[in-house]
Amino acid sequence: MKKITKSILAASALLSSTLSFANPSAYIVYDFKHNQVLEGSNLNTVRPIASVTKLMTANVFLKLNNGNSSCFNEINSLDNDTLKGTSTRLPKNVPIPCSELLYAMLVSSDNYAASSLSRSIPGVSRERFVQEMNKQASEWGMTNTSFSDPSGLSPRNVSTVANLAILSHHSMKQDVIRNITNTRSTVVDANVKKVSFNNTNALLRNGKYNGLLSKTGFTREAGYNLVFVNGQSCGDRTIGVISLNNKSSSERAGFTDNKLSQYHCN
C-alpha cells in the first residue's frame, strides 16, 4: 500500500508543476500494473467528486459488515435527498438485502441505496460511517480527500485525481466492488419489487470495453466525473483513466475512450 501511495503522490507532484490546464479540469492516466503515472493534468487539484464517493462507501461498508450475508436494511425518510432532490426507484420501508443495495449503488449510482448502506451496520450511525470513510482515506494516504456524506451529493466530498488513483487501487482488490462496478445491467431484487438498472458508464453499457473498475459521478459543482480501469489488453499495462469536471457525460466517455486508444487498449 505504501509503495503505490508514494509512487502516485511523488509523480503527481512533478507532473502538476509541468503540465498545463486541460479539459477535463483534472485527469490522470495510471498504469496499475507497474504503479506508474503515465500522464496527467492538475493531479493535486482538489475538486468535488460527486458519486465517485461511492467507491469509498462500498469499501467501508464491506470492511464494517465483515462478510455478514444476512445484512438487510430499508430505505426510509432518513435517506431522503434534501440536497439535490434526487429520487429512487427502489421501494421504501421494506427490508432489502445489503448485497442488492450495493448493486443499486454501484451500477446505477442510486443515492438512497448509498445512504441506506451507511446505516446498515448495527451500532454505526451514518455520521459514524462517514467518519470511518475519512479515517480510511487517511490510512491509505489520501491526504487531499474529505467526505461529508456517503452518496457524494455534497460538494464537500472532495479529492484529487492522484488520490482517486489510490482509492481505485484498493477498490480493485475487492472482488465484490470490481465485479459489481463492471456489470452492464442488473435486476435488483428489492423484496416486493424487482428493479432493472443500467450502468451509468456508457463505455461499459454499450459493450465497447470490459473493466476492472468503473464509477461515474455528477453534480452541478463537480461536473461529469469518471473512474475507469480497463480490463482489456493495453500491451503490458493495466491502464486506468480518472477525469474530473468534464462538461458532459459524452465528453467524459469520449475523453476516456481517446486515452485508452492512445495506449492501444484494444
Image (cartoon, rainbow, N blue to C red):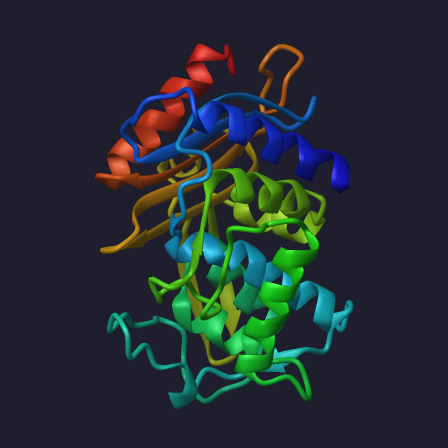
What residue is rendered at 68% in x and 88% in y?
123
What residue is rendered at 28% in x and 74% in y?
83
Q: Is residue 187 visible?
A: no
| Outermost residue toward the front in this view | 17
Quadrant of the frame with the N terminus: top right
**Most foreground residue, 221 or 264:** 221
Q: Position of residue 160 (x, y in %)?
A: 46, 44
**Most foreground residue, 87 or 33:** 33
Q: Is residue 45 above or below residue 149?
A: above
What residue is rendered at 77% in x and 69% in y?
66
What residue is rendered at 35% in x and 71% in y?
89
Q: Position of residue 244 (x, y in %)?
A: 36, 41
Q: Position of residue 151 (x, y in %)?
A: 43, 66
Q: Position of residue 20 (x, y in %)?
A: 32, 22
Name the quadrant containing residue 51: bottom left
**Most foreground residue, 149 or 189:** 149
In the displayed structure image, the side of residue 142 where residue 140 appears, left or right: right
Q: Is residue 90 visible?
A: yes
In the displayed structure image, the side of residue 159 where residue 62 appears, left or right: right
In the displayed structure image, the side of residue 65 where residue 72 appears, left or right: left
Instruction: Tally the marks.
Output: 0
Name the quadrant containing residue 136: bottom right
Q: Is residue 74 above or below residue 21?
A: below
